[in-house]
Amino acid sequence: MDRNSAIGLTLIAVLLIGYFYWFSPQPAAPNTTTVHKVSPEKKDSLQAAIPPAPSDSALQAAYGDVSAVMTGAEAATVIETADLKITFSNRGGAIKELELKKYQSYHQKYELKGNSPLKLVSPEFSEQKLLAQYQGREIDLYTLFYQAEQKKVGDTTEVTFTAALSDGSSITHTYKIPQLGYEIGYAVTTKGFDKQLTGDNLSFQWNYQVQPLEKDLTDTRNNTTITYYSDADGFSELAAKSTSTQAEAFAAPLKWIAIKQKFFLASIVSKNNFAGGEIQTTTNTIDSSVVKNANVKLLIPKKSLADGKADFKFYFGPNDYQVIGGVAERFKENVNLGWRPVYWINKFVIFPVFHFLTQHITNYGIIIIILVILLKLVLFPLSYRSYLSMAKMKVLKPELDEIKARVGEDMTKVQQEQMKLYQQVGVNPISGCVPVLLQMPILFAMFYLFPASIELRQQPFLWAEDLSTYDSLVQLPFTIPFGIGSHISLFTLIMTISTLIYTWQNNQLSSVQGPMKSMSYIMPVVFFFFLNSFSSGLTFYYFISNLVTFAQQAVIKRFVDEGKIRAIMEDNKKKNAAGGGKKSKFMTKLEEAMKASEEARKRADEDKKKRKS
């Protein structure tokens, strides 16, 4: 690796860092839309949230026939499937509590050492309302008392909640729960009751305090937001990494919204579109008990209640690329696979191979090792060309060092002499950078793959208890700034050490000296700070990738004859000296650029001398 190659690799590294810091989506400007939000102090149970019931006569006077279903005794209906445990309440005819039976929070599994399943719905942090205008008053249909019925239709359990009024009108909530999966069908229908409502829309409101389910609260906050989809605007989301209030209002129809955490989703999808709505997220950075507050308001056309078009479904489950594809249009984009072309590489190449391996191997550390080997085999031709270029530079190193010793500190003259030598022996000075550049999309793809893969969640390997987050084998009694935190990731540390060794080996083949050589050692240390809190699966992948690269170079070295390379270069030099050589277009343009630069330098020196005189 000569000076030009080192410059190229340094620029690539700078672009790599800049890509993640400056080219990620910028937080949207805060919207002034007002959306009802749950107070951070609200941790009451459903029973505690019920206000004291007014007298029957007062209810009758205020609400008429509806007053008959505004009081009653609360009862629960529990439905359990292979994946979910759902508790419904007859008060509201709504989901009171929902557990994911196959998942646990980090706190439950590693700190409490318990077996409690993960909750995505609980009255402690989730509140839903269905507001309607009735006789000039606003009523919440999720506070009425309903009669519950349950029946089995094939493999689906159907739960119906009906509130019948004395005038013969009624309102019904119907839930359809399949035996497998995380989708819950939901429909609201009325019989005559819709005619007693005023206004064009009902308002579905969902106030949700996102709970900390993972080890790293900062990373969880950076991946928690509200995503949404409309036919007009497609898929979008509120800025996840912003700690300020984020809000958006919709005048056009909306298909679905999802309260997205890093690995889990709580979503509602409309079969026939919501009429509009508002969404908002707020963050209290000093409150570690809540990740973010998510507030949703969606408009349901009143006329859809009578014609059977108030048809929806909930999705409460993992943000798993293999699971969520059929939930709704573009719902898969809740899993961030990166920007194009990184997205295409992950979607069509890396993810299929990764998931194929997960179906046959249960140890995810082994899967990562196999994935590294497979990708290295595919990229072997590029690695071979890169090593061959370094071998040519190694052969030329004595002559390049001689040029530096002969010319001295005049870097422009040094570069000109080096380019002349490259031309004589038929070597392209950046040919070693091109294979590295072509492999960069794979590097970016892995950067997105591992943090987004729920398959790695709570999967242990060696000393790492969870490959989806950092390994913290070394805990510090203090906090180191610049991204390190209060821990040292051992996988990141050994990845950095192996990268420094790899850099040292390459520098033995290089003629680079001075600041450029120092920079090649600084970059791995910079990445240590950057990756210390990233997924241990990612840093383990990079470490194994370095080890395989060492092995590849050892194999390639056995088949690269440096004596033969020198003989070819000497033959090229003789041909060029005799006038039989032919310059490549690249070398011609590079030579012209060097001459133009030299002429500009001479003119600048002459102008400087004239000004002095």
Image (cartoon, rainbow, N blue to C red):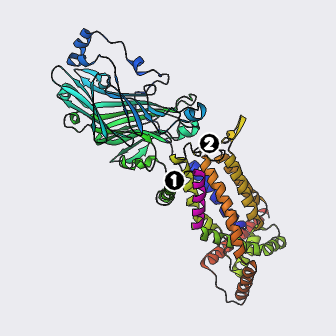
156, 419: nearer the viewer: 156
In this image, 122 relative to 523: left or right? Answer: left
- Residue at point 66%, 62% (across, down): 548
Name the image quarter holding the N terminus: bottom right
Q: Is residue 314 above or below residue 205?
A: below
- Residue at point 74%, 77% (across, down): 562
Q: Residue 383 location, x and y as percent?
A: 63, 68
Q: Which residues are magenta?
A: 363-377
Residue 149: quadrant of the picture: top left
Do the residues under discs 1 and 2 have CB atoms within 8 angstroms?
Answer: no
Disc 1 secondary structure class: helix
The residue singled out by tag 1 in the image is 358
- Residue at point 59%, 67% (across, down): 377
Q: Is residue 132 above or below residue 564?
A: above
Mark 1: amino acid: Thr
- Mark 1 to mark 2: distance in Å? 18 Å
12, 534: nearer the viewer: 534
252, 565: nearer the viewer: 565
Q: Residue 447 location, x and y as percent?
A: 57, 52
Is any part of residue 496 visible from this angle? yes
Name the image quarter holding the C terminus: bottom right
Circle nearer the N terminus (1, 2): 1
Residue 598: quadrant of the picture: bottom right
**Classed neighbour count for the residue bearing mark 2: other residues with Cα under 10 Å, few (<14), some (14–19), many (≥20):** some
Is any part of residue 389 visible from this angle? no
Residue 523: quadrant of the picture: bottom right
In this image, 377 relative to 612: left or right? Answer: left
Q: Residue 546 location, x and y as percent?
A: 67, 59
The residue singled out by tag 2 in the image is 465
